[in-house]
Image: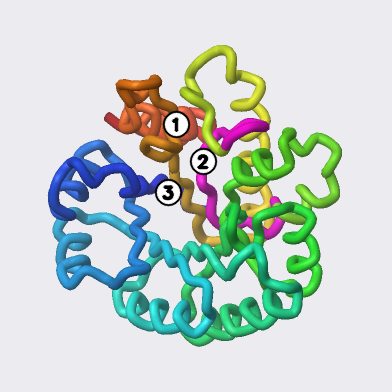
Amino acid sequence: MRLSIHKALWGMEAIGSLDEQLRRVRAAGYDGVEINVSGGVPAELGELLARHELEWCAQLIFERAEDLEAAMAACAPLRPTIFNVHGGRDRFSFDEGCAFFERALAAERRFGIPVGHETHRHRLLYSPFVARAYLERFPDLRLTADFSHWTCVCEYLLGDLDEIMELALSRAIHIHCRVGHEEGPQVADPRAPEFEHYRRTFQGWWDRIRAHCEREGRESLVAVPEYGPPGYLQTLPYTRQPVADLWDICLWQANDLRERWGLPGRLT
């Protein structure tokens, strides 16, 4: 199984144009990028991805399934590695959620590109308990695992949810590698020793996802060190000065994963 690490463009807006962002990502040694194209696919995206020799994941955030389908159709010619979907809303009834996933799964079959539905607050899979119901209803439903949202929603590290977590881990095909905690979706700095317990908990989940994907015979698995800018990233009062450097945190997380998984080379 091929393991790839992609850089999310979230938080890179200040660097400059899309071309400049992709140039920096490539220079650092990432395999690809994850780009939110919910507002439309940039006309130059295909040419820029080819120029910088980068794979890409398409992030799509839509409440309505018909809008998601249209966005998938627009992205499909550029053959993203995966569609990472923030789907529906947490306020949907179970029947409304089922209708969303039925259309999304049909679109996935039509376009032939894997879809990971993210375990994200505010969306259909905001809670492990709600997610279990959908996973049991739809055997083909696959996840983008960002369990920092679940630890925040539940306000603990999910230590007594072994059955639910095993189901979720077995369905994950895409990973957002962000360490969260009980009171928020992102620790201040995952390198800090006071967050070691949280870091080890999340690393264990990511390792188990990799193992599941290998046993399943999947061709590839993409991991994204998706730490967010302020206000995901904590800041000092009054000055709004970030407590850590976002680029460095993501780079450290990428290298930590590369070393943990025995991948050659080091991102710089």
Q: Dot 2 corresponds to which residue?
A: 177
- Choose the circle earlier in sequence order: 1 or 2: 2
Q: Earlier in the sequence, mark 3 or mark 1?
A: 3
Relative horizontal placement of residue 36, taking residue 121 as reference (left or right): left
Residue ID at (41%, 45%): 5
Q: Is residue 112 left or right of residue 212?
A: left
Please name the residue that numbered disc 1 is placed on. Answer: 253
Residue for badge 3: 4
Task: Give the crowd class for mark 2: few <14, some 14-19, many >=20 residues within 10 Å.
Answer: many
The image quarter in which residue 34 lies:
bottom left
Left/right placement of residue 9 relative to residue 114 reads: left
Q: Is residue 175 magenta?
A: yes
Q: Amino acid at mark 1?
A: Gln
Q: CA distance from mark 2 to mark 3?
A: 12 Å
At horizontal 53% and vertical 80% (from top left) the residue drawn is: 65
Q: In the image, which residues are magenta?
A: 169-184
Q: Secondary structure at mark 2?
A: loop
Label 2 is placed on what type of residue? Cys
Whole-percent x, y for residue 101 in the image: 64, 77
Q: Which residue occupies the extreme front position in the image? A: 238
